[in-house]
Structures are given as C-alpha cells and as structure tokens.
Amino acid sequence: MPSAKKGGLGEEDDLSESKSAVQHGFFETGFGKSIARNWALCFLILMTMVFSLTSRGFFDIVNFQNILHLSTGSFLLAVAETLVVITGGIDLSIGYVYGLASVLGAKVMQVLSVAGLPTVSVVLLGCCAAVVASLLPGFVNGIVITRFKVPSFIATMGMWGICNGVTLFLSDGFMPVMGAPEIINKIGNGFVFYIDPGKSVSFFQKPSYIADTNIRQLIRLFPNSLFLTLVVLLVVSFVMRRTAFGRHTYAIGGSMDAAVRSGINVNRHLVVIYTISSFLAGIAGLFNLFQTGIGNYTPSGANYELMAVAAVVIGGASLTGGKGRILGTAVGVLVLAVLENGLQIMGVSAFYRYIGVGILLVIAVVIDRAFPDLF
Amino acid sequence: MKKRYAIVIAVLLAALTVMPAVAQKQQLTFLFMPGVQDPFYTTMEKGIRAKCKELGINLIVAEYPKAWGPEYQVPILQAAVQRGGFQGLLIAPTSVDALKAPLKAVYDKGIEIITVDTFLGDGDYSKPNTDYNFPLSYIGSDNELGGKQVAEHLAKLVGEKGKVYCQATNPDASSVAARVAGFKKGIAQFPNMKLVGVEWCLDVQQKAQEQTLAALQKDKDIVGIFGVNVFSAQGANQAVVNAGLVGAVKIASWDATVSNIDNLRKGVVDLVLAQKPAEMGSLAVEWMYKYLTQKVQVPKKVIPGFEFFTKDNVNDPAMAQYIYQ
C-alpha cells in the first residue's frame, strides 16, 4: 500500500520520501526511482522522438498546437476524474455532463439568438446556463454517495443515464444543436498571436487583409484553448499540493476512517469534490461547443469518462485512492493524444491504434501494481 | 320477362348489400415504426402519409424512439402491436439481428412487413432458409452505390486528380461501412486519384476534427474529403478551416438534412448526397397496398436512388423536395 494510505497525506513528495522496504534493484537507485516515478513522461518524450524521426509532418509546431488544442476537453475531464479517483471513487457521469453542457449551452444560445438578443448576451447567458446546470449532477452524486452510502460507481452511473436522457431530450434524439453565434467558433479555434512574417503581429484575430483562404501564410501561435487548459491545470494542481483542501482529499482516499478520526468533514468534502468534478466536465462541454460551434450530445461510443480514467491511471494515480498528481494526469492525456496522432500520421490503421491504446493502458496498470511504492 | 327483372333486381340488391362489405374489407390500416427521431424519418412519414391519403389507407405512426437502437425501438413496437388494428407494418429496424425475433413474432400474427431504409440480416429477403426472409421487401438506399456516386461527384469537383480522405463514423454500422466501401471503389476508377486514409470518429465531431487535422498534417495536398454524416463532415470542415485550406479542399457529405443544406449554402461543405426518404415511404405504402389488395408479387428489394446538391442547384425549387424537413 502506498504510504499515503497509511499516513493520510498523499502529496507526491511525501509519498516518494516514505518508500517501503520492497527492493526493486535498479528502481532503488535515484535515477531508477526518477524513471519509475515519471515513466509516463519518459514514454511521452521517447514516443515524441520516435514519431519525429519516423512520421513526416509530426515534428511541426502546427501539429503540436493541434494536439494541445484538441486535447482541451480531455485535459479538463481527466482533471475532474483525478480529483474523484484520489478520494478512492470514480465518476462515470462526466462524459454525459460534458454532452449535457454542450447541448444545453447551444440550445440556450439558439433560442436567445432567435429571440433577437445581442450576441454578447446570447453567449454569456448560454455559458451561464451550461455551467450552472453542470453543478447539479455532481452535487446530487455527492449527496447520494455520502448520505445514502451508494457506491460511486453506481451513483454516477445513474447520473450517466439521467444526463444522457436530458441531453437526448434537448437535442431531439441525436441531432447536433445548431444556431449558436458564429463568434464562439472563432474564439474556440482562435490563437493569441497571428504573425505575418515581416509585416505585422496581431492578437486574438487575424489581420483583416488576410482572407480565410490565405491564412496559411500566417504563423499562428498559442491557441486560446491552451489558456483554459493551463489555468485549470495550475489552479487545481496548486489546490491539491498546497492547500488543506488538497491534503484532506488525499487523506480521504488514503484512509476514510483515519480522515474521519482526524476531524475532516468527509461527507461535505466528497460532495464538494463530486460537484467540482461535474463543474469541470461542464466547462469541458462548454468548450466543446466553442470548438465545434454546435451542441454535441455524447455518443455512447465516445467513452469520454473511460478515456479520462485511462489518462488518470497512466498519469500515476491509483484507482484504489490516495494517490495521484494533476500534472501526471496531464502527461497521461498527452501520452494518449500523441500516441493517436503519431500513429495516424505514421499511417497506422485506426483499428491497430485501438490496440495500441489498450496495450498502453494495461502496461500502466501493471506498473502501478508492480511498483506501488515507487511513486 | 317479369321473372328476368326480378332476377336482375335481386342481383343488384345483393350487390348493393355486399359492396359496402367489400369496401369495408379494403379499408386498410398500416403502422409506421420509424428508427429514431430525426428529419430523415419525419420526411419519410410525410411520404407515407401522402400515399396513404391517396389510397384511402388509415395510418398509425408509432412513437418516434428518442435514440437509435433496439433497446429503444422494440418496446415501442411491442406496445403498438399489442394495441393491434393494422394489417401492414412499415418499419426501419434498428438492428440487423436484434429485430429478427420481434418482427417474426409480428409476422406470425398475420401482419405483413416491409422494412424501409434499414433491413434485417443482409437485406436479401429472397434467400431461402434464413431467419430473416419473411418481410415482403426492403425499400431503401444502396449505401455502397451512394458511396461510389459520392466519389464520382467529388472527383468532378476536384478535376479528377489528387489525394482524397474519408472521415467515417462507426465501423460497426453496416450502412457506414458500405458507404466507405463504395467510396473506395468509386475513387479507384480514377487513375490520378488516391484515397490516403479512412478514419472513424464514432459520431464525435471533435474527434473528426482531430483526425482530419492529423490527415492534413500527413498529406498536406489532400484535395477532397468525404464525411459520411453530418458530424464527420462538420468536423472535417472545422479542420480544413483551422488548417487554412478553405477552398483548397472540397468536402462531400451524406444526407440532405437542413443543417447539411445550410452548411452547403455557407460553404462549409461542397456536395451533399440526398437519399429519398419520402419516396421510400411512398413506395413502401404502394407495394404493401398492392400486395394486400391484389396479391401482386413484391420485389424483394427496391432502391429509389439519390440526388446530389451542389452550390449550383441548392436554391433550385425543384430540388427543395429532397431536403429532409
């Protein structure tokens, strides 16, 4: 068992300092420990090097920005899942809260646009509706799990169905909800810097003299979406590493009984954790609306929540709770995204890529089980 | 003479009493069971309604399932069958396998069945000794032919040369797989064209965007993309916009939904294949009626064909009938 479970702390620094007496040879050395602790990061670097050498078009700033931009939803969902996994639970509803927020936001914007409200009001009210609605599923999950002692797997699966049903109702079956202002699509896919080499630099929008068909002559840097990702990653990471709230979260996942005995209001804390998880999923869904310009319901084949769990596990968290790092999860998301992107650019068929992702996930869990004390 | 008149009058009287009974016997009722709540099936319902009105048939429309799948469709079907009162069933089965048993049970009650848009088994009801040869006919699109025709139209748009890419949705959906297979065959007809990849976005538009961007990164000179439904076409378009390739890459899409037609008008897509759901529905009513009233032999497969929308004909009033409303 990781020390966090016994001590009820759980910050990675504490974890690394209190290794058990289990001997792992190479992994007992400083370098070995570092490799083991950061195997996903090492794998990511290695994979990036291999793809850069073997896949024409992979090593390109445009491609790296595409990977980051298109992983925004995955980053947010995985951060949401990490919080819950650290407490020893699981949240299966985030994928459908994601779809609910996307569709509800689009629906509100569609209705208000038709009513003739100014674009700014349409966008703001649509965003507010999506964000506020996304708090509710998590709050209910937390109440059901803590007050009625329903396992998180079951409670969140119930919410999975409820959110799916509401989303399908709002989207009239499985049609995308259209009619949101076009500006959201430009914001969602925009960049901070647009550089016309030797001529101009503009911020947040391309120079007016450049047509859409000539946008390739610009150097576009730092997608807007990266702001959102960095803010969420840094804020949640800070909270988990540096605040009492973070320490309590690890303590609950490490040992629920110890957390109760130490005076933590576990029930209230878990309700907050599930609400935050749902909130982050809602933000991710709202971003999906900005990125695609339409409200997308969550198809059953999307498996957003399971891919989030995969990223969390690859990032070093334990499904039994008490262990996990936000930045590790971010690496987990990137490992999956780079693997997909690199293999596709290499020309590997989609079906083989599914196998690749599956193998990687199994390897992650094997490492977690074989060397639990090294993290 | 009087005797003759008496016989004629008796025959006329007998005819007058029997005629209404015959007419009553001909008063048919059909049940329409759609696959899911979407514009394709509401358009099909309009075609069915119009033909039923023309032929004097009562129509019952079952509740539209809110999502695709036998788990949604079968309970609605069974409730409608329980209520009864119809002689013909026009249904879009949502599974090639899972609907076999429920529909066989309906058939065993003496109700004739025509499947529209989708089918049971492999859709060939002429095969003997199968567990799915009981429907009278399958009336729907030939997806493979449609995919091939999309390839041919797309080839014209790009000057019959260059690389093309296919953004598909679900590899386990037979209709989608057939569209992709047809597209491959269609492109293979053009020696100066090459299909550089097929990706599956599982109906997730963001995934389609991600996969198309990677495809454009791998082959920067792609000139055409076939998005096999609205999600894949829109995701592909967003990728093309992000890559700054608007105008340089032509996008073809499947199904003349209002959203796809709007996208064509806005320049998001360049070509839209329209199936003919209203015609499918109308033909299904007609063949069911002919079978039940005249016992004519119904063809086991009826394929209504396609129409293609481009920027040039999208505002043509004659094409408006093919938009799914």
Image (cartoon, rainbow, N blue to C red):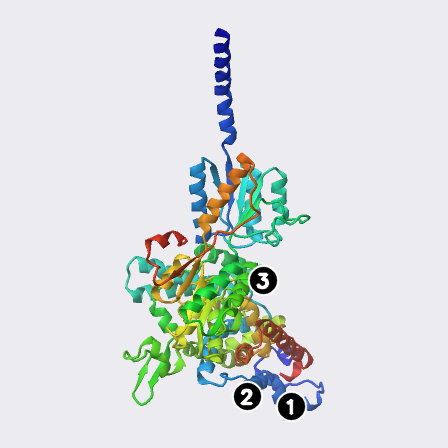
Residue type indicated by callout 1: Gly
Q: Looking at the image, is B179 positioned above or below residue A354?
A: above
Q: Nearer the viewer, residue B233 or B154?
A: B154
Instruction: Specify whether disc 3 shares its chain with disc 1.
Output: no
Residue A305 location (% of width, % of height) = 55, 68
Q: Looking at the image, is B15 positioned above or below residue B41?
A: above
Asked which quadrant contains residue A353, the reply is: bottom right
- Residue occupied by mark 3: B172
Residue type indicated by callout 2: Leu
Disc 3: which chain?
B
Q: Which of B252 and B244 is in front in this view?
A: B252
- State the residue at coordinates (61%, 76%): A356
Q: Which of A34 and A217 is in front in this view?
A: A217
Q: Find the residue positioned furthest to the top.
A: B2
Residue A36 location (% of width, % of height) = 63, 86
Residue B170 location (% of width, % of height) = 54, 64
**Distance CA(mark 3)–CA(mark 2):** 34 Å
Residue B88 location (% of width, % of height) = 54, 39
- Residue occupied by mark 1: A32
Q: What mark, if any, has residue A53 been given in the picture?
A: 2
